[in-house]
Image (tube, rainbow, N blue to C red):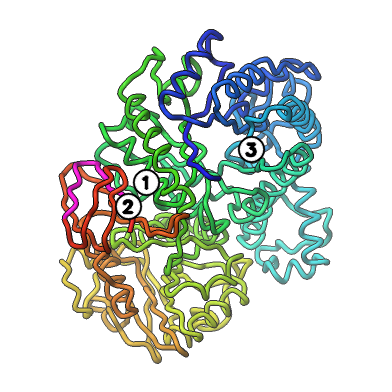
Amino acid sequence: MDKLLYGAAYYDEYMPEERLETDMQMMREAGMNLIRIAESTWATEEPRGGVFDFHHVTRVLQAAEKHGISVIVGTPTYAVPPWLAAKYPEILAVTEQGRGKYGRRQNMDITHAAYRFHAERVIRELMKVCSGYGCVIGYQLDNETHHYDTCGPNVLKGFTAHLRERFGTVEAMNRAFGLDYWSNSLDAWENLPDPTGSINISYRGEFEKYRRGLVADFLRWQAGIVSEYLHDGQFLTHNLDFDFRGSSFGIQPDADHRAIADVVDIAGCDIYHLSQEKLDGKQIAFCCDETRSLKNGNFLVLETQAQGHPHWTPFPGQLRLQAFSHLAGGANCVEYWHWHSIHNSFETYWKGVLSHDMQPNAVYREACTIGADFDRLSPHLVGLQKKNRVAILASNESLTALEWFSHTIGGQIDYNVLLRALYDALFDLNVECDILFPQDRDRFAAYDLLVVPALYCADDGLLLALKDYVKEGGNLVATFKTGFSNEYATVAHDRQPHLLTEVFGLEYDEFTIPENVSLTGDGFDLTREERGLQSWMELITPTTAQTLSRYDHPYWGAYTAVTENEYGKGTASYLGAWPTEAYLRAFFTRRLKAMGLWGPGQEAVVSIRSGVNRLGKRVHYYFNYSMEEKEQVNLYGECTELLSGRGVQPGEAVLLPPWGFAILEE
């Protein structure tokens, strides 16, 4: 891509037909050069089985070509039409709650043959219609695809085949999963029980991994169809979403992002974040960093909020701040969901750029300034490349296992909360991170610091890769519950952490949930409250490790909480308990200084995100995520502030208004 893409999802199907020309003109006046269409409207495109009507698609494509607007076309398979569900009620997914009812989107079994047949038919008809339009630059496969908790007969049949291929015999599976417990040992493949009722985490965890794999398989199947119609220069993408807790939060539990990334040409994502006084940049940064890391390159923000929920309505200036925050994470595209606010049904109050009156408003006027700046500054901002020295290793398998055991460990360990606590502490220190997955173990050596939250499930190869990383000079920081079980969630029979006791220079065999326990002995300038613990603590005995912090408690004070150990050419630190974010910031400050990764940027009063543009110049974004005016000196060489065009000397102060930002190019 040689320019930044900026635009919105557009649904002609939901609008009065006379609006199309007005909308196109308003988009161009706003500097928008991209729309996404078609992914939500299968029932309009195929109102009856085998009867197709792409009137709205062709209208929009023709209008887009007329106005010089590029188009990403979405395959419309995530919301099935009523006639299909009536003809084949069995395509509605069977979940643990029973068979789903028609009405909601994403309620189908993505493996079902009848669903696949009709999905392929509408995809092919849509591709035939779109292939003749030069404005189409790419295709989005489906929409925010998950496995939708599907566990019907054909899913279980596929899972049985998966297990037979993996283990060969039921005896081998019984041994791997420990199925002799509570008489769960299997005698024959045809007697394989429904895993959703199992009490065995090895069995259930493998099923969850299998279901995540179904998502990648489904999108790979779609990619094969769409690829038959692609022209030179067109791309395939998918809009990945994240764990959603009122806004985008952590890694997605119901899809394997790393596997999906291998299916598409360009990674894409949907990022919805807190706003108003809660806008802090962390959600945007995390989601950008995860998506960028999947293919180690630029990506597309295919959905983000303009207005969104009522509590997201942005303060003046925040829409600009948000848009450029995506660019600072390596995005080449910012696209709003959606252009106009919908006038009925489920998402009536998830507002787009335009409100229900469809007239220019404050958000639209601010969007116009973004479009103008994107167009003007594209040569300096498109294709931003990052070479981060810190990475965080995330694990869907560990997330599944720790969620499974929440009932026996007091519901205390929330994997995504821990992941984000570590990420957020580094963000507060202006340390940019890549997000890796176990499939990326061959990339470990590229990073000076690797942070590993609660790697509960890991095969020996992954643990040995971490061991080799430290031995060859890497710096590893891991938390409690790392190296506790193998890839099937079977706990090791040796001292914990399995295979890593030498690396960390410690061992333990007891753990508990902290009550009235804090940390001491480290010399950090923290209050007692900031030294408090939550959720989990391991009673560590150092062997070769140095104690950084120990427990402040009349009984647990005999044990170590946080350690550092030299191993080979590197250093391994272990957090045996879950501390506060204030402690994490103090801990990482110490570690970064020891590694020589501490600089003026870590003490800045604003958030800083950096990279190298296609002109070979360093670009630094200064973001003020606050209600207060802030002043930050230029920490780099002689720069040009790109928004204003003025020169900024080293050490010269840059004044940022509330929710303001500056872009410095060296």
Write down the region rendered in magenta: 653-663
Residue 121, percent from left and from top: 79, 29
Asked whether the viewer can see residue 618, the reply is yes
Give the main secondary structure, helix, strand or loop, of the magenta stretch: strand
What kind of residue is marked 2?
Answer: Tyr
For mark 1, what is the residue? 325
Q: Earlier in the sequence, mark 3 or mark 2?
A: 3
Asked whether the viewer can see residue 90, the reply is no
- Label 3 neighbourhood size at 10 Å, few (<14), some (14-19), many (20+)? many
Residue 124, percent from left and from top: 78, 30
Q: Earlier in the sequence, mark 3 or mark 1?
A: 3
Q: Quadrant of residue 363?
A: top left
Q: How many marks?
A: 3
How far separated are the C-alphas under marks 1 and 2?
Answer: 8 Å
Q: Is residue 507 magenta?
A: no
Q: Is residue 662 magenta?
A: yes
- Label 2 neighbourhood size at 10 Å, few (<14), some (14-19), many (20+)? many
The answer to the question of whether label 3 and label 1 lie on touching residues, with beta carbons closer than 8 A, is no
Q: Quadrant of residue 510?
A: bottom left
